[in-house]
Image: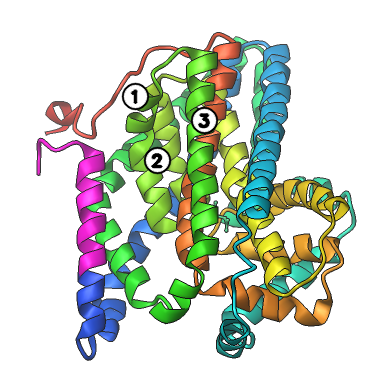
């Protein structure tokens, strides 16, 4: 396996995991075997990635800002990033709405299928927990997200991966203050964070050594815990529309990369592929973040000044795949349940899905929680929400895998565009996990 490139190793791990998962569903006790003996490896891997996310954001963002040496440049990067993120998200939602209106996946769903899906999933804990979570999020006021971004306790913020935006806020605040005390006095702290940054990136390299085995475990577990195959087939057209839209988004990113950076899109996809494969296997942009950062900086050549801000912010607020899915899912549910959704309703979806993508957590299944809020914004009856979610629940996990790939590819693309626009797109400088092994032997 030594000579194979990382993405091939991961891909082989994934395929074997799927095959193994299917084999286990055929054997009695196979499911339990996978969840008792195989799944823990995947869970440990995801935990390791999450473990280093906060130290990585802290170290790399402080290094990024202090390397900038000029605060006005940071403002430039910040404004461009937010602007382009919103732009790509609107493209994603509009594309999703166009496809679902043209292809009408909800019209062919029979009443029996709807009944079957409703009885199977409407009171499933997966659906009810999402409805409860949505009610909690919805009761917040319009500026709540700004309020939530500011921590009142730095240590508490760093102790919770869901509070990534708070950590980003604190780190930017600290980075700017570090710039303002002058180079000489900032040096000790800057050196500390520079070194921490190198250490954390080395940790990413080490964790990635087990990635091919971990994705085997993750995918075997996805296969054994997936729903009734008959119900999956009934939703094939809907799933097909989502996947088609997501694939077109990847094409859209390739065009952006070519037009705005002049780089070969296939090269871009190849270099970013290990992060995409992990996004697919973990369904979590947050867990994938350390790998996305490593690929974008070392293998694509985006300077840390840009990537250290654009990527963590993107992982939390930019979810093009999720917003496309929300557009398609909302209209699909309306079509299947014969709920009238005029053009004005669809325009509302664009706005709420844009806001929902900012508010969606970067963890598996979060997109479905925000879908509830999108549905409510168009006046979807509250008593039918559980039925609506039940309709799409069976295919949610596989679609989550695909949309997370698009989410992180969008972040990587925007980091290239922003870097190019401020002259910070350089040459790749790949580091291997064993670069300094001779020195420490
Ligand atoms: N799992 C997605 C992510 O982490 C969010 C979602 O669409 O559920 O990017």
Q: Nearer the viewer, mark 2 or mark 3?
A: 3
Q: Earlier in the sequence, mark 2 or mark 3?
A: 3
Label 2–label 1 contact, CB within 8 A? no
Quadrant of the image occupied by residue 319: top right
414 or 169, nearer to the observer: 414
Residue 188 visible at all: no
Q: CA distance from mark 3 to mark 1?
A: 13 Å
- Relative placement, left or right, of 29 versus 371 is left
Label 2–label 3 contact, CB within 8 A? no
Label annotation for residue 291: 2
152 or 372, nearer to the observer: 372
Horizontal and vertical percent position of residue 250: 48, 37
191 or 324, nearer to the observer: 324
- Tell me where the magenta segment starts and ends, as one range: 1-19
- What colour scheme does the image use? rainbow
Q: CA distance from mark 2 to mark 3?
A: 19 Å
Number of residues whose C-alpha sits closer than 10 Å to that of mark 2, classed few (under 14), some (14–19) or many (20 or more): many
Q: Which residue is mark 3?
A: 253
Residue 208 visible at all: yes
Q: Residue at x 37, y 13 (%)?
A: 427
SS label for mark 3: helix
Q: Regarding ligand 1, which quadrant of the image does it lie in?
A: bottom right
The response on whether ligand 1 sits within 8 Å of label 1 is: no
Whether residue 419 is situated above or below residue 209 in the rendered picture = above
Does the magenta segment cover residue 261? no
Q: Earlier in the sequence, mark 2 or mark 1?
A: 1
Label annotation for residue 267: 1
Q: Residue at x 60, y 22 (%)?
A: 65
Q: Residue at x 76, y 80 (%)?
A: 384
């Amino acid at each position: 396996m030594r000579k194979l490139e990382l993405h091939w190793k991961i891909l082989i791990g994934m395929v074997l995991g799927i095959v193994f998962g299917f084999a286990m569903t055929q054997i009695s006790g196979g499911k339990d075997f996978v969840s008792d003996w195989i799944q823990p490896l995947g869970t440990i891997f995801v935990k390791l990635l999450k473990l280093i996310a906060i130290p990585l954001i802290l170290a790399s963002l402080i290094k990024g800002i202090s390397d900038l040496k000029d605060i006005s440049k940071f403002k430039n990067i910040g404004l461009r990033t937010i602007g382009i993120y919103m732009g790509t998200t609107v493209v994603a939602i509009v594309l999703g709405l166009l496809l679902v209106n043209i292809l009408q996946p909800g019209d062919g769903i029979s009443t029996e299928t709807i009944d079957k899906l409703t009885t199977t999933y409407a009171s499933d804990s997966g659906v009810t927990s999402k409805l409860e979570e949505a009610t909690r999020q919805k009761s917040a006021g319009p500026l709540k997200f700004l309020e939530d971004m500011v921590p009142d306790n730095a240590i508490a913020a760093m102790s919770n991966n869901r509070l990534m935006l708070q950590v980003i806020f604190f780190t930017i605040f600290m980075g700017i203050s570090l710039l303002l005390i002058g180079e000489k006095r900032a040096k000790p702290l800057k050196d500390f964070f520079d070194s921490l940054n190198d250490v954390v990136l080395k940790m990413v390299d080490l964790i990635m050594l087990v990635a091919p085995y971990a994705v085997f475990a993750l995918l075997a577990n996805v296969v054994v815990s997936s729903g009734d195959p008959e119900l999956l087939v009934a939703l094939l057209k809907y799933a097909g529309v989502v996947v088609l839209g997501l694939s077109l988004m990847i094409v859209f990113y390739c065009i952006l990369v070519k037009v705005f950076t002049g780089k070969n899109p296939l090269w871009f996809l190849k270099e970013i592929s290990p992060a995409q494969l992990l996004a697919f296997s973990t369904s979590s942009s947050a867990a994938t973040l350390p790998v996305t950062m490593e690929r974008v900086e070392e293998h694509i050549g985006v300077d840390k000044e840009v990537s250290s801000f654009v990527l963590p912010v993107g992982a939390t607020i930019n979810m093009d795949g999720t917003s496309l899915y929300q557009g398609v899912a909302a209209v699909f549910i309306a079509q299947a349940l014969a709920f009238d959704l005029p053009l004005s309703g669809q325009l509302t979806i664009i706005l709420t899905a844009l806001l929902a993508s900012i508010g969606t957590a970067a963890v598996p299944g979060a997109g479905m929680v925000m879908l509830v809020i999108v549905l409510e914004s168009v006046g979807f009856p509250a008593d039918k929400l559980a039925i609506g979610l039940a309709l799409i629940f069976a295919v949610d996990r596989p679609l989550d895998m695909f949309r997370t790939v698009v989410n992180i590819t969008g972040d990587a693309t925007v980091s290239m565009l922003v870097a190019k626009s401020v002259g910070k797109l350089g040459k790749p400088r790949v580091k291997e996990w064993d670069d300094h092994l001779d020195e420490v032997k």
